[in-house]
Amino acid sequence: IKRIGLLTSGGDCQALNATMRGVVKGLSNSVENLEVYGFDDGYKGLIYGKYRMLTAKDFSGILTQGGTILGTSRQPFKLMRVPDEKGLDKVEAMKQTYYKLCLDCLVILGGNGTQKTANLLREEGLNIIHLPKTIDNDIWGTDMTFGFQSALEIATNAIDCIHTTAASHGRVFIVEIMGHKVGSLTLNAGVAGGADVILIPEIPYDINKVAEAIQKRNKAGKRFTILAVAEGAISKEDAELPKKKYKEKLTERVKKYPSVSYEIADQIQAVTGSEVRITVPGHMQRGGEPCAYDRVLSTRIGAGAAQAIMDEEYGIMIGVINGKIKRVPLAECAGKLKMVSPKDQLVKAAKQIGISFGD
Ligand code: F6P
């Protein structure tokens, strides 16, 4: 008999169900007596003992279904050691649920924050396997996270759609792309969508350089310019500020602008006199069906987790490195962010074909 727990935590993405399906199908074919417990809404379900027993039927027909059949929630890592409003010790409560159900292993699907809590539970003695989910592709120790390629299709499509209207009106357009503090999604969507300017957090921009790129296009007779701007994009000036000062500036900025793109739009308008429009695809990027790439990746990661459970190897993340499924110790990867290197080959290629990064 094997008893495993499953939970999905943090922001959702497209291939969560496909991954869980991979884990459960991978085990069902080899383990005679399998019990699967699904926790509701991420760590919340584990803390408050909210779970249900799942059967093979629950995992049938969900390969293409976006979102998560378990529900999810954000439970910030920094609050995990802080008792809840009723004084409950959350970490102890999670351990109790785990032991009450006599779990052999808890499989946790989530991003960076989720991974930190997964590592904390490992340190507390639980058998944990983490599966790297996020549209941001910012998890250290894996080349690819599931969700990223599906979101990339959507973000690229957004830029594609903007092209025709930008060209008709001769406007400057900003397409703001998710990614939190990392520019991977913006960089890839910007290149795939043929953006003229790409602004990512890893390469702080100079607004005058951005304006120059637009003016250069105008002079060359191009009627429009499209900027792919990461939601975490930062100016050179702001990047040089001490952390505290930058936070203060951000607090002021959110009073005036809903996001960084609006500030950039104002600045471009002021310097170039161009008409600027902003499109924010937002959570659409996490919605809908997983693309074929993600279905394959998720199935491989899920099956990789099933194999690790059969081998009784825990305390790991199942990642993919150079095309091969790898077991990465949580102790090694938890808490590390994978950022885009300004020397990345894709950055180089983009610059080579004339895309400006405003640097
Ligand atoms: O981490 C995934 C992500 O979509 C980020 O790209 C984005 O910054 C964040 O989640 C949005 O979070 P929420 O769904 O809580 O608004």
Image (cartoon, rainbow, N blue to C red):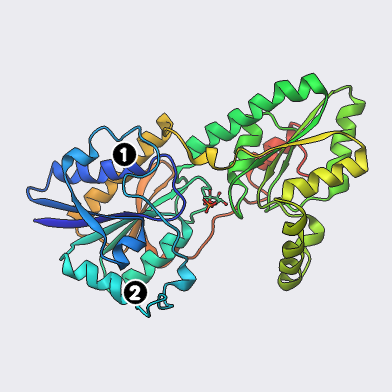
Residue drawn at x 22%, y 41% is: 58
Helix, strand or loop at disc 2? helix
Q: Which residue is mark 1?
A: 299
Residue drawn at x 49%, y 65% is: 335
Q: Is residue 297 left or right of residue 255?
A: left
Q: Residues within 10 Å of mark 1 (few under 14, many from 20)?
A: many
Q: Residue furthest bottom?
A: 87
Q: Position of residue 43 (x, y in %)?
A: 35, 62
Residue drawn at x 76%, y 43% is: 357
Labels 2, 1: front one: 2
Quarter of the figure with residue 181: bottom right
Helix, strand or loop at disc 1? helix
Residue type at mark 2 is Val
Q: Confirm whether residue 191 shows in the render.
A: yes
Q: Residues within 10 Å of mark 2 (few under 14, many from 20)?
A: some
Q: Is residue 159 left or right of residue 172?
A: left
Q: Position of residue 223 (x, y in %)?
A: 84, 23
User: Does the numbered disc 1 mark a residue whose Cβ is under 8 Å from ligand 1?
Assistant: no
Q: Mark on residue 289?
A: none
Residue drawn at x 22%, y 45% is: 24
Residue 343 vertical position relative to residue 87 in the rendered view, above or below: above
Q: Which residue is mark 2?
A: 91
